[in-house]
Image (cartoon, rainbow, N blue to C red):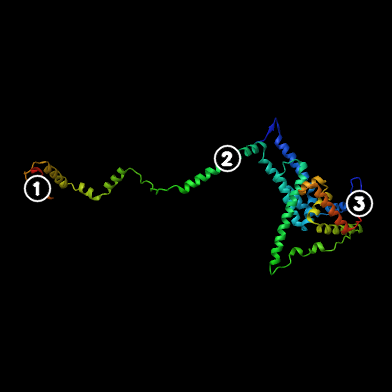
Amino acid sequence: MPAVTHGDVDLSDSSSNARSGALSQFLASVEVRAFKIAQTALRHEDDALDAVQDAMLQLARAYSDRPPEEWKPLFYRILENRIRDMQRRRTVRNRVISWLPFRSESDEDEPDPIAEAASEDPLPMRRLEIAEAMGALEKALGALPRRQQQAFLLRTLEGLDVAQTARAMGCSEGSVKTHYFRALQTLRAQLGELYV
Amino acid sequence: MSRDSNGTTDFERQLHTLLQESVQRVGGHARSRLNQARHAALAEAARRSRWHLPLRAAAWLQLRPLWMPATGAVAAAVLVAFVLWPHAPQAYPGAEANPTTVEDLDLLADHEGMDLMQSGDGQFYEWAMAQTNQRGRPAGTGATGQGGAPGQNAGTDTNQNSG
C-alpha cells in the first residue's frame, strides 16, 4: 500500500491511527447513552441496539474523516434517521399483521421467566425508589411526541447545547428551545417533583 | 423552583440524575453488543481509510468524471456492434485449403484411373494416339481408328475440307 511519507515517518499511518483512536474513544463515550435514547424511542432493546450499530457504521463509513467536533451531532442525526426508519417499518408491519385473520401474540411479549424470577438479593429501599422513579420517567418520556422526546434527551442525557441539538435534529435553535420547553412542561405535569 | 447559575431547575437536575442512573444500569448483554458494534465500525473506518489515501482519492475523483462516460460509451458501442453485425456463415476449419491438394486427393482416390494405368497393355493410349493422328491427316486417307465412330470423324473432316 503506497503511503505518503515524510522522511522516515509514515504520516498517513500515524494520522490514521490517531483518527481511529479518536473515533473509538468517541463511540465508546456515546454508545450507552445513544442506546438509551434509541430504546426510549423504539421501546425494544434489540431494535435499539441495531439502530445504534447502524449509526456507528454509517458514521465510520461516511464521516470518519470529518473533524471530531462534528461527530456528535452527525452521529445523533444518523441515529435519529435510523430510529425513524425503524418506526415506519414497524408501523407498516403492525398494519399488515392487524389484517391477518389468524394472528397470535408474539413470543417477545411473553415475560422472560429468568428475568421475572425473584432475586435473593433484596433491593435496598433507595434503589427501589430510584427504580420506580425511573420507570415513571421512561413511561412519560415514551409518551412524549418524538421531537420533544429527542430534544429533551439530547439536551438532558447527552448534554448537547442548543446549537448542537439543532444540528442533530436538523432544525433551528428556536425549535429546539420550544420542543425542550414543552417536553419539560409535560414531564412536570405527569411526574410532579421527583425525590431522587 | 430554584435555578442554578446555568438556569437549570431542580426538576431538570433530578431528571438528569435519573437518566444517568438508567444509563449505569444498562445490562451486560447490551454493553457487549455495543462493544461489538463499535469494533465493527472501527474496522469499517480502517478499511475505508486504506482505500481513501489522499493521493489515490484525488486521482480517482479527478479521473472519474472523465473515464466513466467514456468507458460506458465504448462498452455500449461494442455491444451494439456485436448485436447488429451481419454474421457470415462460418466455414469449416480446413475448407480453405489449396484446391490443388484436393485434386491430387481425387486422383489418388480414383481406383478406375489407377487400374487403367496398371493394366500394362496400353490399349487406351494407342487408341488415343490414333485419334490424334487421324485428326492431323488430310482428308480422304480413309484411316480408321480403333473403336469409337471413325465414319463420323471422316465425314466431319471431309465436310470441313470441302468447305
Residue under the point 73% across and 47% down: B39
Tell me how far mark 1 sits from mark 2, CA to CA.
Answer: 88 Å
* Residue A87 spot, x, y in % from top left: 73, 57
Tell me if mark 1 has few (under 14), some (14-19) or many (20+) residues whose alpha carbon lies within 10 angstroms of its own: few
Mark 3: which secondary structure?
Answer: helix
Q: Secondary structure at mark 2?
A: helix
The circle on residue B10 is 3
Q: Amino acid at mark 3?
A: Asp
Residue corresponding to mark 2: B67
Q: Nearer the viewer, mark 1 or mark 3?
A: 3
Looking at the picture, which amino acid does disc 2 mark?
Trp
Is residue A152 visible to us here? no
Q: Residue furthest bottom?
A: A102
Locate residue A4: give its quadrant. Answer: top right
Query: Closest to the observer: B130 or A101?
Result: A101
In the rendered image, residue A103, in percent from the top left (x then y), is placed at 70, 68
Q: Residue at x 54, y 43 (%)?
A: B73
Is label 1 or label 2 in front? Answer: 2
Circle 1 chain: B
Give me the C-alpha separation between circle 3 and circle 2.
Answer: 63 Å
Query: Can residue A115 be seen from the camera position used here?
Result: yes
Residue A94 locus on image (x, y percent): 72, 63
Residue B10 screen position, x and y as percent: 91, 51
Asked if the residue at tag 3 contacts the one at tag 1, i.e. Cβ–Cβ closer than 8 Å, the answer is: no
Q: Say if labels 3 and 2 share a chain.
A: yes
Give the chain letter at badge 3: B
Residue to which mark 1 is pinned: B155
Which of the 4 image quarters holds residue B51?
top right
